[in-house]
Image (cartoon, rainbow, N blue to C red):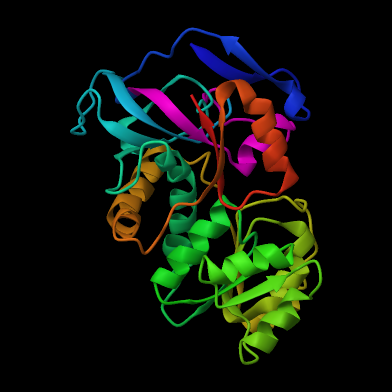
Amino acid sequence: MKAVYISTPGGPEVLEIREVPAPVPGPGEVLIDVVAAGLNRADVQQRRGHYPPPPGASEVPGLEVSGRIAAFGPGVTKAFSLGDKVVALLAGGGYAQQVAVSAEQVLRLPDGVDLVTAASLPEVAATVYSNLIMTAQLQAGETVLIHGATGGIGTMAIQLAKAVGATVAATAGSDEKVGTAKAFLGADIAINYAEENFPESLKAQNGGKGADVILDVVGAKYLQQNIDALADYGRLIVIGLQGGAKGEVDLGQLLRKRAAIIGTSLRPRPVEEKAVIMNAVREFIWPMLSDGRIKPLVAKSFPLEQVRQAHEYFDSGEHVGKVLLLL
């Protein structure tokens, strides 16, 4: 089968398509014929040498796929059939024509979503639900601030937060993306971080109140501003380090606000935890996709042979929504 490998850390030019043996599903695993794979920031960080796969995971990048079940390993207890259309959450291996993954991390497609578009869902749905709902316990009436409004995480997070009744503020880097966050995704407040101080702008547009929850993909670069933007008893959830991993915290300010900083990562979690998250996604997110409260947003799709061009496009930051590889 064909699969993408990283020859050495670097830019998109280091991505190589190789012919390799197909994986064999182990105990409790299913084999999936991949139709499409989603690109994520983690793939870019892995390509650059900053985010190696967890021990035992495939070297092939790719954390989410859609496709059809092709075979079963021993001991699979979930009620799947050969040929079922499914999506899967992976620790790696998605940029390949076949992937073996625990059946506990596999879901049938939500009603009304086609097989290619479905590849945009498992990683972002699991990330957003596990962080906004399971970890931050976002409630109706609270204010949530979401950074990276028009990326894959941002587009899902804005829609989910609106669906649960939160007031949604979001940041983006251009007036066009700010407009998209409000007009298309439904954000109540949208802030151009390139031109505005987002803690000040948030409070000015939110009756003087900060954010009860902040979902942050930036990390150290935004640490102080995020703390400034928190309301009393606020929860800052850090899920990405695009802006660096080390920062300085004024603990006094954190204490005065009775606030919390929580760091989470989905990829290295054990299968048992991912199973709980995926079951919650099926019960909570899938119905919202089926009835239109949440709409998947795909910016562009590329054939596998154009994986370098797909990463160049992702790196440009021009996309609104997910970028997909077609296998």
Residue 44 located within the stretch drawn in magenta:
yes
Residue at 68% x, 77% y is 229
Vertical placement of residue 305 versus 105, above or below: above
Vertical placement of residue 143 versus 77, above or below: below
Query: Residue 105, image x and y in percent?
Result: 36, 37
Vertical placement of residue 277 versus 160, above or below: above
Query: Residue 5, image x and y in percent?
Result: 63, 19
Tell me, yes or no, if residue 51 can be seen here: no
Q: Is residue 195 left or right of residue 110?
A: right
In the rendered structure, which segment of residues is drawn in magenta? 31-58
Query: Residue 164, image x and y in percent?
Result: 39, 72
- Looking at the image, the residue that sits furthest to the bottom is 207
Q: Picture quarter containing residue 50?
A: top right
Residue at 44% x, 56% y is 130
How many numbered dots are placed on residues in this image?
Answer: 0
Residue 234 located within the stretch drawn in magenta:
no
Q: Is residue 204 left or right of residue 182?
A: right
Q: Is residue 71 left or right of residue 179?
A: left
Residue at 42% x, 57% y is 295
Q: Is residue 52 left or right of residue 165?
A: right
